[in-house]
Image (cartoon, rainbow, N blue to C red):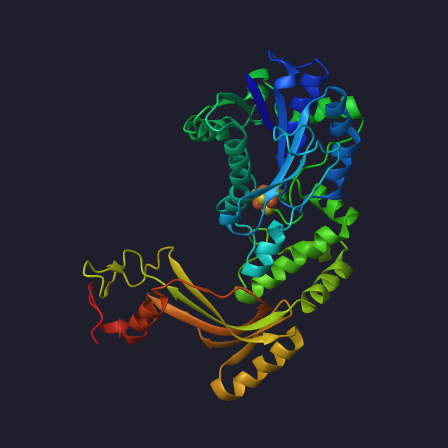
């Protein structure tokens, strides 16, 4: 039976693999059939690279365990994945690579986030799926097809909810048989960290992107230690947040706390300023940002020609449509000059949030639906709009809301 471990480089993965290779965890299979595979997002810390290089690579090499590193080939799914390194390729035309870490491919998650003017959302793990899960699935398809194999998932003992969600998904994939050996062994995260400390003599670093929004909970002190040790991680996190806040001032990296604020309070204010300077050096665009805050229950009518409103004008629900349109491209300084010039012709008010100005032309206010409209400067490439946006925008602008009844459709 072939066995694959998807190795996230964190404590759970490292503890299982070390435990198996040191004979402290059961592995009732042939080690020659074990393949360890990591999907590279491109924004991991140097501490993770160092720990992998100093400990996991030599251990895998000593036991002849195959190690594969894969990544997205581009932002587009159509381009598939690239093999960054494979120490024992199944393709006879490919030479074995040495045991070394290749921490990023041609593109990284932060590239996508800068171009889209956004940050990872804690409401979903879309980034993890797109940059890890999807990549590993494509690799497994190429490698195994529908052949039977065991798939080791390193969830710790307390992660039974994640296992339950993963199990159904895994079993739906032809040939894939999930195995959760840390849960079977009763090793929780603390036990994994304790064993790693016993084996290697230091605290195994958390494996995550430097801007991961999940790292600032009870573990915030560790995040600040990581940030203090790796300034580029802070600059990327702050730059992403600052750019996203240009397009939506509510977008802070850590729920109600901004990364910039946390960094300043931690004495890393100099890095915040450097992040702003790095952002200034990127090609920029002047954007028209429009949003429609829809009313709960609204929908297109069945003929597809108009819209029906939900019953309660005060209930905005959760659906917000956004349109980003670039109207000029250049340097950030040039775009900021244009922004100021636009006020002369369009009116509106310049507002500055965290050092980022925007020209507010329309503010959102109940009743719903309602719209907001402003101009701002952000990194180039974020233009995005759903096809029906303009139609709904015009519809909302034609409404005379205080006089609206429950159902309306546009005329003309
Ligand atoms: S570590 Fe965090 S930011 Fe990076 S891919 Fe995973 S969830 Fe997203």
Q: Is residue 115 left or right of residue 219?
A: left
Q: Is residue 377 left or right of residue 236?
A: left
Image quadrant in which you'd find residue 49:
top right
Residue drawn at the location 67% of the way across and 45% of the way down: 104
Residue nearest the observer in this picture, 370 or 279: 279
Image quadrant in which you'd find residue 57:
top right
Q: Position of residue 198 (x, y in %)?
A: 77, 22
Say whether residue 191 is visible: no
Residue nearest the observer in this picture, 253 or 23: 23
Say whether residue 293 is visible: yes
Q: Residue furthest front?
A: 93
Residue drawn at the location 50% of the way across and 33% of the way down: 141
Q: Tell me the quadrant of the picture where the N terminus can be found.
A: top right
Q: Is residue 195 left or right of residue 395?
A: right
Q: Is residue 123 above or below residue 306?
A: above
Q: Is residue 229 above or below residue 332?
A: above
Q: Position of residue 185 (x, y in %)?
A: 59, 16
């Amino acid at each position: 039976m072939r066995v694959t471990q998807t190795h996230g480089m964190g404590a759970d993965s490292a503890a299982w693999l070390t435990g198996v290779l040191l004979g402290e965890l059961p592995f009732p299979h042939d080690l020659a059939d074990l393949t360890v595979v990591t999907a590279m997002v491109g924004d991991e810390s140097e501490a993770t690279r160092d720990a992998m290089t100093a400990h996991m690579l030599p251990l895998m090499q000593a036991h002849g365990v195959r190690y594969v590193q894969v990544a997205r080939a581009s932002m587009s799914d159509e381009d598939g994945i690239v093999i960054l390194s494979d120490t024992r390729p199944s393709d006879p035309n490919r030479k074995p690579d040495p045991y070394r870490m290749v921490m990023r491919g041609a593109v990284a998650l932060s590239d996508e986030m800068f171009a889209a003017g956004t940050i990872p959302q804690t409401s979903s793990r879309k980034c993890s799926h797109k940059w890890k899960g999807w990549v590993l699935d494509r690799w497994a398809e190429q490698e195994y097809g529908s052949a039977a194999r065991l798939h080791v998932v390193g969830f710790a003992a307390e992660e039974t909810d994640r296992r339950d969600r993963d199990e159904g998904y895994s079993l739906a994939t032809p040939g894939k048989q999930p195995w959760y050996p840390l849960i079977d062994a009763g090793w929780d995260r603390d036990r994994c960290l304790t064993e790693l400390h016993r084996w290697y003599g230091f605290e195994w670093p958390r494996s995550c992107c430097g801007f991961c929004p999940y790292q600032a909970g009870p573990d915030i002190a560790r995040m600040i230690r990581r940030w203090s040790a790796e300034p580029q991680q802070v600059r990327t996190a702050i730059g992403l947040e600052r750019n996203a806040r240009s397009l939506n001032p509510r977008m802070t990296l850590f729920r109600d706390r901004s990364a910039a604020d946390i960094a300043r309070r931690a004495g890393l204010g100099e890095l915040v300023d450097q992040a702003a300077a790095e952002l200034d050096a990127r090609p920029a665009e002047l954007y028209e940002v429009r949003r429609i805050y829809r009313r709960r229950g609204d929908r297109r009518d069945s003929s597809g020609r108009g819209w029906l409103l939900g019953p309660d004008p005060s209930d905005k629900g959760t659906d917000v449509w956004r349109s980003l349109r670039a109207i000029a491209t250049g340097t950030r300084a040039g775009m900021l000059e244009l922004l100021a010039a636009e006020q002369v012709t369009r009116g509106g008010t310049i507002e500055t949030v965290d050092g980022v100005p925007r020209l507010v032309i329309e503010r959102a206010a109940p009743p719903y639906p309602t719209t907001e409209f402003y101009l701002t400067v952000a990194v180039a490439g974020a233009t995005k709009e759903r096809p029906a946006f303009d139609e709904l925008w015009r519809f909302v602008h034609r409404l005379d809301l205080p006089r609206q009844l429950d159902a309306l459709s546009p005329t003309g």
